[in-house]
Image: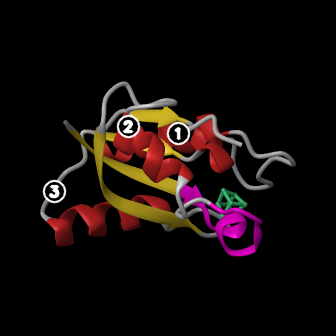
Amino acid sequence: MKNVAIVGCGTYMDQGYGCPGEWRCLKAAALGEGKFEEPSSVISFIKCECPGRTVVPAIGMAAKLSEIKPDLIFLSSCFANAKPACPYTSPEDMAAIIQDKTGIEVVLGTHEYH
Ligand code: SF4
């Protein structure tokens, strides 16, 4: 079982209807559905906050405090497939930044539930 961190769009999490963090990302991880290739343990759920500069430090802090380095980092589906798009960054750019700073592979999206 892999240990994974999930990064959600904080604006959507705070203001959206049916936000991440309630069940979709967690169910997909638990069952190995959607973008999860196997049942995975979510060891941190990080909230991006505009303009996105806190994501990398928050991932680092979560790994430090939990004493578990994630095997993979996922950008939640609400982050990766946002419509309208995030005005600050593209999912691809954010994934590249996270991957560059942490050395951990980043997957775009988590689930395909509605
Ligand atoms: S920077 Fe983009 S992805 Fe991050 S919280 Fe703001 S709108 Fe969402």
Going from the N terminus, do you reach mark 1 or mark 3 first?
Answer: 3
| Residue holding disc 1 | 110
Q: How crowded is mark 2: few (under 14 residues within 10 Å), some or many (20 or more)?
A: some
Going from the N terminus, do you reach mark 3 or mark 2 first?
Answer: 2
First to last magenta residue range? 8-19
**Residue visible at 44% across and 52% down in the picture:** 26
Colouring convention used in this rendered image of the protein = secondary structure
Q: In which quarter of the image is the N terminus?
A: top left
User: Compared to 68, does 28 lie above or below?
Assistant: above
Q: Does the magenta stretch include residue 17?
A: yes
| Residue holding disc 3 | 68
Q: What number is the disc on residue 46?
A: none
* Nearer-the-camera pick, 25 or 3: 25
**96 relative to 18 in the view: left or right:** left
Q: Hey, which quadrant is residue 105 in on the image? A: top left
Going from the N terminus, do you reach mark 1 or mark 2 first?
Answer: 2
